[in-house]
Amino acid sequence: MSAVEFAHIEEAAARLAGHAVRTPLIESPALNDRLGLRVLIKPESLQRVGAFKFRGAYNRLVQLSPAERKRGVVAFSSGNHAQGVALAANLLGMPALIVMPSDAPAVKVEATRGYGAEIKLYDRLTESREAIAAAIAAERGSTVVPAFDDPHIIAGQGTVGLELFHQSQALGATLDLLIAPVGGGGLMAGTSLAIKTLSPGTAAVGVEPKGFDDTLASLKAGSRQVFKPTTRSLCDALESPAPGELTFPILQKTLADIAVVDDAEVAEAMRYAFSTLKLVLEPGGSVGLAALLAGKIAQAKAGATVGLVLSGANVDPDQFARVLRREL
Amino acid sequence: MSAVEFAHIEEAAARLAGHAVRTPLIESPALNDRLGLRVLIKPESLQRVGAFKFRGAYNRLVQLSPAERKRGVVAFSSGNHAQGVALAANLLGMPALIVMPSDAPAVKVEATRGYGAEIKLYDRLTESREAIAAAIAAERGSTVVPAFDDPHIIAGQGTVGLELFHQSQALGATLDLLIAPVGGGGLMAGTSLAIKTLSPGTAAVGVEPKGFDDTLASLKAGSRQVFKPTTRSLCDALESPAPGELTFPILQKTLADIAVVDDAEVAEAMRYAFSTLKLVLEPGGSVGLAALLAGKIAQAKAGATVGLVLSGANVDPDQFARVLRREL
């Protein structure tokens, strides 16, 4: 399987039933009033490991053979994919080694270790995580689990879209718009594929952080553009240099647009989520909200019904405190 | 109407439909694993105004006559009831004046003003809020809206229990235990009345903060005990000196027990909610979680299914930051 089809997302949903949290669809009258929209919020921050990443990881790992399970899995990730793979491996009784940058948020490193994974730290500036992971995998015979460029991972993340559609439908709502973050594009590829299959009239708009709008550049160019990032973003989870080889063709078909938000807008969205939505969000998890609050989604016409994916909440307490105190 | 009956809660639910948020029932596998329980969380932190108080306030105000609406409402509250009354009055187009202590959390004062209410601050140590509210109500002909000792308020809060029961039932779960905070007892009286009517086998356990365990003392004495508080609690929302005249007889019938938690346990629960549940909670909103995490609920036997009400999330950003940094 290389191309991802809608049926694979439905199969993933069946595999995840009883293992992943079916996150609720929530609505804030205060947010609706402020934006003049009906925003149906899908808080994947409430997913196991605090991010949607558990879905794809579990869907990938549960399909490994007994022999493969025994030899374990290797992944590289700055945090949320690391935790998703670590927990899924733990639940399925297989060893996991995660290659993480030495400057990853402490909360993500600790949580990954807490799920029983072995951690190997590397220097983001001088070492190649792909090379480290490949070497370890070769030595141990382990399976490398990509963060997004894998059909099972994409199908797993697509269950967010499947649930969002069915939960909206149960409210009698039709989504005019789908908004979700874009890093490597796994979440958005799977989710937009699910939503556009079930509701072709829904426009899908991705959101990237400033300096990491590689998918926007790729869509404009009509081919994958690889960035050489020169800055950091508050959104550690979305610092991907390029869309994936599998995710990009899907995004080309499904996306209407990409909005770009800066760190100040992201911090403002985190404060709004704290004070009004009462949800903890990490920077990368709040970019869709940030784009809406900053008026950066041209497709969000007055009265529109919007499905908004808030993708994660793994933020260091100290960083969160600094955001609350406007020190960031 | 003076006694509260189950039918009044169902009537309140009909009045609140489309106005209050039907908060989701959420579940955290991490919390379940840690406690060895199945905890079905009812996050009223996600309710309008960030606390369950909107339910009772709306149910009370919507029943006022056109003439009464014109003369407006007066309430006294340190914060969440203030916001509930202010928003309900705003939605129903009537003036509201709220008497608030001058040391109420700034976030609660600002939010109350933001809903369009007039605010009158008083000194908690030297002035009587009841006298101030009564004088204003007499002068303007306004209706005083009590925070908990009112049958319509109790019935409105009871819709939390109604939803909790039906949402649990939809999961095929039977509640062995109901846990909710107790201040004046409005939330617990309404909620336990609803749950015990629908599921007589469910044990209801309240939680009070240390120094304000007036309901526990009253239950032991068999009559309402009025405390003269000598300290403050982190749980500003639960600093009531006595159970209500209407709430106490209900609590006498419905409660199996009351647990008491201290500030350190509450702060720990707020950090757990932040880091694991990814929910913002105010101190008073987290006492049930605090009691569970601290092992203070004797009725929470291994494997039990627990309905846990997290009642509010209106906490100053600076206070929240101090809790995260363990400065509190």
Image (cartoon, coloured by chain):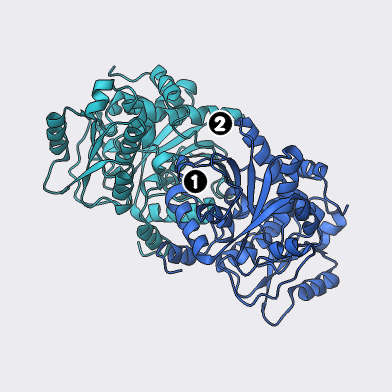
Chain colours: A cyan, B blue
In the rendered image, the vertical position of residue A8 relative to residue A42, given as above or below:
above
- The image quadrant that residue B195 belongs to is top right
> Quick check: B210 left or right of B216?
left
Q: Position of residue B310 (x, y in %)?
A: 58, 51
Residue A168 tag number:
2
Q: How many marks?
A: 2
Q: Where is residue B286 in the image (x, y as percent from the top left)?
A: 55, 56
- SS label for mark 2: helix
Q: Where is residue A155 in the image (x, y as percent from the top left)?
A: 37, 25
Q: Which amino acid does label 2 sit on?
A: Ser
Would residue B116 be seen by someone viewing this image from the given angle?
A: no
Subunit bearing disc 2: A
Residue on which disc 1 sits: B35
Determine the residue positioned at 29% across, 45% down. A113
Q: What residue type is labelled 1?
A: Leu
In the rendered image, the vertical position of residue B222 relative to residue A188, given as above or below:
below
Would residue A5 be seen by someone viewing this image from the given angle?
A: yes
